[in-house]
């Protein structure tokens, strides 16, 4: 049962939509993962700043201990604080202060009062900041508002609550980012805590804008859109063309009758030529398809372990991988020769190669009035290779020789061994070939035939076949007139 063009196109569109949807879903997951990594990086920055803050608080504890032990405030200590004094029993601490006041017990019922401004306590932390892209905020024990390194206070209950908890990062929406002095785009804050003992538990947040990550995500999504559209367009175009060709061939096949043996051989040669041409043309398309196909396979492999608990999603991803492998196998089949791939090796008799090629072209020589001669010893050793491909290469050489030879002319096929190599020569007494044309004879689409009578692919394909068998093909003048094509293949 054949699908109609509309049904096939609909199926292809649905498949592309499904693949595109899955790709977009995976891209979103990748973007979330990138933001998580960005948050982890900011958490490291916050942890570094928290370590510096902890050092400052430890210095405050040491100064308080020194005052308590000596019963006096050294001048070297006093100059580091806004207020530093030893309180007598019952004496009240200073009520008015804009900084941070620390009280420590001292012997004899006394206490040590030390007051630091925010700028003094956070001194050095501002070096971590980058104006407009990264800033630090601190949550002090017992305070309901956040502090910046320059002493400003901020009212952000969400960030303050996160610092009181155990989170390592927090995504900040646009209004919160703007409140912190960052661009009004999504920001990410890395969170760290400092347990300063008697000075309480402090929190440090390193808030950074995710502007670059979001812009990169937007560019990636546009590239994904263009890739899906391009791949979808190619699939639809080639699918539609293939289906139209298939329908035309089926309609033509119903009306054809069994032709003469020579006509059947002509059709076989034509089909072989078309298949070889399709390999050459498809190689370019396959190279372009391989990149998005690799992306699809890679994304599907990344998604598979993440949906292992969802049976339906797991099966869907496995289907994508199976169908992608099927496409890859088809592409590899087309590119075997184009990429110098190794053919299917087997022991092949040179006699069978020559006889098979002669049987395919005999009627063409008879029609052209050209005499075909063969001199191939029966005891030649076997070669290793693909009989079908080698036969096709020799057919191309023979047809070229036939086209280059005038009526009543001669073409000779000979074969011999030369050391560890089989040599097959096709010699004609036609118009001959110049050195310049001989040097370019195996280039794709180069031909000396009149317009409309040659594609320039026959010798190029024959050359690729011989190269895939680790051999060589040379085209040269045969002397006064005529051309010799020499095919060399290692023996098995």
Image (cartoon, grey):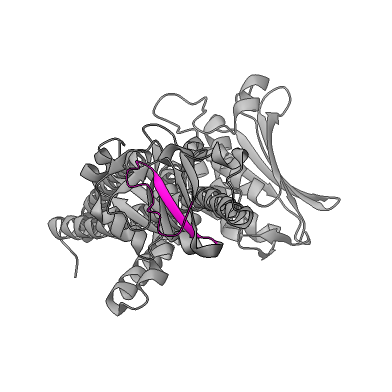
Task: List x then y, in percent, for residue 221.
Answer: 30, 45
Above or below, 305 relative to 436: below
Q: Quadrant of residue 452?
A: top left
Residue under the point 42% across and 30% down? 453
Q: What is the magenta range?
A: 87-106
Task: List x then y, in percent, for residue 69.
Answer: 62, 57
Locate the C terminus and report the quarter of the image it occupies.
bottom right
Name the side, left or right, on which 84 lies relative to 237. Answer: right
Residue under the point 66% across and 30% down? 483
Name the side, left or right, on which 137 lies relative to 154. Answer: right
Asked whether residue 146 is in view, the answer is yes
Above or below, 349 relative to 181: below
Task: List x then y, in percent, for residue 281.
Answer: 42, 42
Residue under the point 49% across and 26% down? 449
Q: Quadrant of residue 143?
A: bottom left
Locate the N terminus and report the quarter of the image it occupies.
bottom left
Above or below, 7 relative to 278: below
Name the side, left or right, on which 1 lies relative to 74. Answer: left
Within the magenta stretch, is there residue 241? no
186, 139: nearer the viewer: 139
Give the main secondary structure, helix, strand or loop, of the magenta stretch.
loop
Asked whether residue 213 is in view, the answer is no
Q: Quadrant of residue 442?
A: top right
């Amino acid at each position: 049962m054949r699908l109609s063009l509309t049904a096939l196109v609909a199926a292809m569109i649905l498949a592309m939509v499904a693949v595109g949807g899955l790709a977009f879903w995976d891209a979103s997951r990748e973007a979330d993962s990138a933001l998580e990594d960005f948050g982890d990086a900011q958490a490291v920055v916050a942890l570094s700043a928290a370590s510096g803050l902890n050092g400052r608080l430890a210095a405050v504890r040491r100064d308080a201990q020194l005052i308590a032990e000596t019963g006096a405030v050294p001048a070297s200590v006093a100059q580091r604080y806004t207020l530093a004094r030893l309180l007598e029993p019952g004496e009240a601490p200073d009520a008015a202060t804009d900084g941070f006041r620390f009280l420590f017990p001292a012997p004899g019922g006394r206490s040590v009062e030390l007051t630091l401004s925010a700028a003094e306590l956070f001194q050095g932390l501002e070096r971590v900041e980058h104006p407009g892209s990264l800033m630090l905020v601190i949550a002090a024990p017992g305070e309901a508002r956040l502090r910046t390194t320059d002493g400003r206070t901020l009212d952000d209950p969400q960030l303050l609550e996160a610092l009181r908890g155990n989170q390592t990062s927090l995504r900040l929406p646009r209004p919160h980012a703007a409140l912190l002095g960052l661009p009004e785009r999504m920001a990410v804050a890395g969170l760290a805590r400092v347990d300063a003992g008697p000075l309480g538990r402090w929190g440090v947040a390193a808030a950074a804008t995710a502007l670059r990550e979001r812009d990169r995500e937007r560019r990636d999504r546009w590239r994904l859109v263009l890739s899906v559209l391009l791949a979808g367009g190619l699939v639809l175009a080639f699918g539609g063309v293939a289906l139209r060709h298939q329908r035309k061939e089926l309609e033509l096949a119903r009306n054809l009758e069994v032709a003469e043996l020579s006509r059947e051989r002509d059709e076989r040669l034509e089909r072989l030529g078309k298949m070889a041409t399709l390999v050459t043309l498809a190689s370019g398309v396959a190279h372009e398809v391989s990149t998005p196909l690799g992306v699809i396979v890679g994304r599907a492999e990344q998604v598979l372990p993440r949906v292992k608990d969802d049976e339906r999603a797991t099966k869907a991803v496995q289907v994508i991988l199976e169908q992608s492998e099927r496409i890859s196998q088809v592409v590899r089949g087309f590119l075997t020769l184009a990429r110098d791939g190794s053919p299917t090796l087997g022991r092949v008799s040179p006699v069978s190669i020559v006889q098979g090629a002669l049987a395919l072209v005999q009627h063409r020589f008879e029609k052209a009035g050209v005499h075909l001669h063969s001199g191939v010893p029966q005891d030649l050793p076997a070669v290793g290779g693909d009989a079908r491909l080698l036969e096709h290469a020799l057919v191309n050489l023979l047809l070229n020789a036939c086209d280059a030879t005038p009526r009543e002319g001669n073409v000779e096929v000979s074969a011999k061994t030369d050391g560890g190599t089989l040599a097959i020569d096709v010699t004609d007494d036609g118009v001959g070939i110049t050195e310049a044309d001989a040097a370019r004879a195996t280039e794709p689409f180069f031909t000396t035939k009149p317009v409309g009578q040659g594609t320039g692919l026959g010798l190029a394909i024959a050359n690729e076949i011989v190269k895939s068998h680790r051999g060589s093909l040379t085209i040269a003048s045969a002397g006064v007139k005529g051309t010799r094509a020499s095919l060399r293949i290692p023996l098995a």
